[in-house]
Image (cartoon, rainbow, N blue to C red):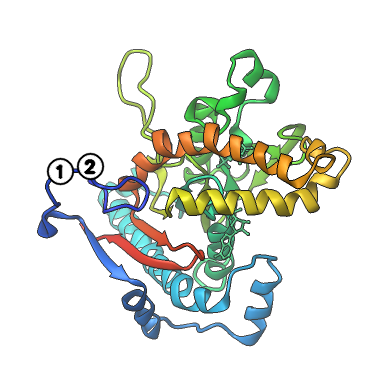
């Protein structure tokens, strides 16, 4: 796998280091304008009815952004799905009887920091990809279902490392995606609740042979853990047919994190069973101080230490500006 990252807004080039030679990059860099011009080649423009349905997803995303950025992306992915099916056909021809495998889901990983907008991108892609007659069944899962239960995090001293790679049951997550990719009829996963800030006891999410699976989470591009014998294992990202890294400046992400916290304080945190209810009982300033500490001591550290270093493994890096609008895209061409 090619690992040289495109220029980033998260971790700038070290002072004094040599500029990357343009001809050696495996990425093609496109401005927003260059990318959005590609939508002219995109069949299936959005109908008025679909625009309404997208609005119904409850996201604040503006519709020009959907047309300019995410519609061309859904076309690119549609082409990848077709090409991947052809490749599997070639493999089956080569393998003969041993190969005869039914179509397996096309798996897309969506990575990036807490609050960068992964869920919004993943929800949009789910809606846009399901419009194509070749792949109407698109499922989306978030990796938070594979966080260790709170009791276990406490026992291991990991409560302030939530979202770090070690706070997940990584083997179970990889097995879950491997089973779906292998075409199992029915695969289940645990469910995480932001309300109780914990795994929901006894609840499971079921995935039944989708055409496309979108796996969204902070750590989806992490390399595999070595096995006990030191040998390399197959990791989650090895099952991805395509991956997207959502990138933005940490200062902007912090602002989005705090804005989301402010909104949640007025809505979901009001629920008596919310883990964060206590922050509705103190002043907004006090609540935001707490959120700022969470950002600076947990989420920002995780972004810089674990998440951003995986950016160069993505097939596509989308870079957002301060207003969430995508400004540049780097697409892997090699
Ligand atoms: N394109 C967008 N335009 C405006 N606001 C957005 C956009 N994408 C995300 N947001 C807002 O930014 C915050 C973080 O987005 P979210 O998708 O919840 O992030 P993540 O899943 O990465 O934690 C949310 O408050 C969301 O409403
Ligand atoms: C649940 C999360 C770890 C994100 O998980 P993901 O779905 O990306 O695997 C994150 O949203 C979170 O709760 N972080 C802990 C610190 C905080 O509450 O901001």
Q: Residue at x 40, y 48 (%)?
A: 240
The residue that disc 1 covers is: 17
Among the 4 quarters of the image, the one containing residue 143: top right
Residue 310 is tagged as none
Q: Is mark 2 within 8 Å of ligand 1?
A: no
Q: Residue at x 27, y 53 (%)?
A: 7
Q: Is mark 1 within 8 Å of ligand 1?
A: no
Q: Residue at x 37, y 19 (%)?
A: 227
Quick one: SS at disc 1? loop
Q: Quadrant of ligand 1?
A: bottom right
Residue 14 is tagged as 2
Could you say which is closer to the camera, residue 292 or residue 186?
Answer: 292
* Label 2: few (<14), some (14–19) or many (≥20) C-alpha neighbours in 10 Å: few
Q: Position of residue 159 (x, y in %)?
A: 62, 24
Judge left or right: residue 12 versus residue 81. left
Q: Position of residue 20 (x, y in %)?
A: 14, 52
Whether residue 67 is situated above or below residue 243 in the rendered picture: below
* The N terminus - image quarter: top left
Q: Residue furthest right?
A: 272
Q: Position of residue 268 (x, y in %)?
A: 79, 49
Q: Position of residue 9 (x, y in %)?
A: 35, 53
| Residue 143 in view in this figure | yes
Q: Are marks 2 and 1 in contact (CB under 8 Å)?
A: yes
* Label 1: few (<14), some (14–19) or many (≥20) C-alpha neighbours in 10 Å: few
Judge left or right: residue 150 versus residue 173. right
Quick one: SS at disc 2? loop
Compute the Cα span from label 2 to label 1.
6 Å
| Residue 209 in view in this figure | no
Judge left or right: residue 162 versus residue 241. right
Among the 4 quarters of the image, the one containing residue 11: top left
């Amino acid at each position: 796998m090619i690992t040289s990252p495109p220029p980033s807004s998260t971790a700038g080039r070290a002072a004094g280091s040599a500029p990357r030679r343009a001809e050696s990059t495996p990425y093609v860099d496109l401005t927003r304008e260059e990318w959005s011009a590609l939508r002219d080649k995109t069949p299936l423009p959005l109908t008025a009815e679909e625009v309404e349905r997208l609005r119904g997803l409850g996201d604040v995303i503006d519709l020009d952004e959907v047309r300019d950025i995410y519609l061309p992306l859904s076309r690119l992915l549609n082409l990848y799905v077709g090409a991947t099916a052809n490749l599997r056909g070639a493999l089956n021809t080569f393998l003969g009887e041993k190969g005869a495998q039914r179509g397996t889901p096309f798996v897309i990983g969506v990575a990036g920091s807490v609050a960068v907008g992964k869920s919004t991108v993943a929800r949009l892609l789910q809606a846009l990809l399901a419009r194509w007659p070749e792949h109407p069944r698109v499922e989306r899962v978030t990796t938070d279902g594979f966080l260790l239960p709170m009791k276990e995090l406490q026992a291991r001293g990991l409560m302030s490392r939530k979202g770090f790679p070690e706070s997940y049951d990584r083997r179970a997550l990889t097995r879950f995606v491997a089973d779906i990719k292998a075409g199992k009829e029915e695969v289940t996963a645990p469910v995480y609740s932001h309300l109780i800030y914990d795994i929901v006891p006894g609840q499971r999410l079921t995935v039944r042979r989708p055409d496309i699976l979108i796996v969204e989470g902070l750590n989806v591009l992490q390399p595999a853990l070595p096995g006990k014998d030191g040998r390399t294992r197959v990791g989650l990202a090895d099952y991805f047919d395509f991956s997207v890294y959502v990138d933005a400046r940490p200062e902007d992400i912090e602002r989005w994190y705090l804005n989301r916290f402010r909104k949640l304080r007025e809505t979901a945190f009001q629920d008596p069973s919310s883990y964060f209810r206590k922050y509705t009982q103190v002043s907004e300033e006090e609540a935001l101080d707490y959120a700022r500490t969470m950002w600076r001591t947990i989420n920002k550290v995780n972004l810089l230490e674990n998440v951003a270093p995986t950016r160069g493994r993505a097939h596509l890096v989308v870079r957002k500006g301060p207003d969430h609008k995508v400004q540049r895209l780097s697409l892997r061409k090699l």
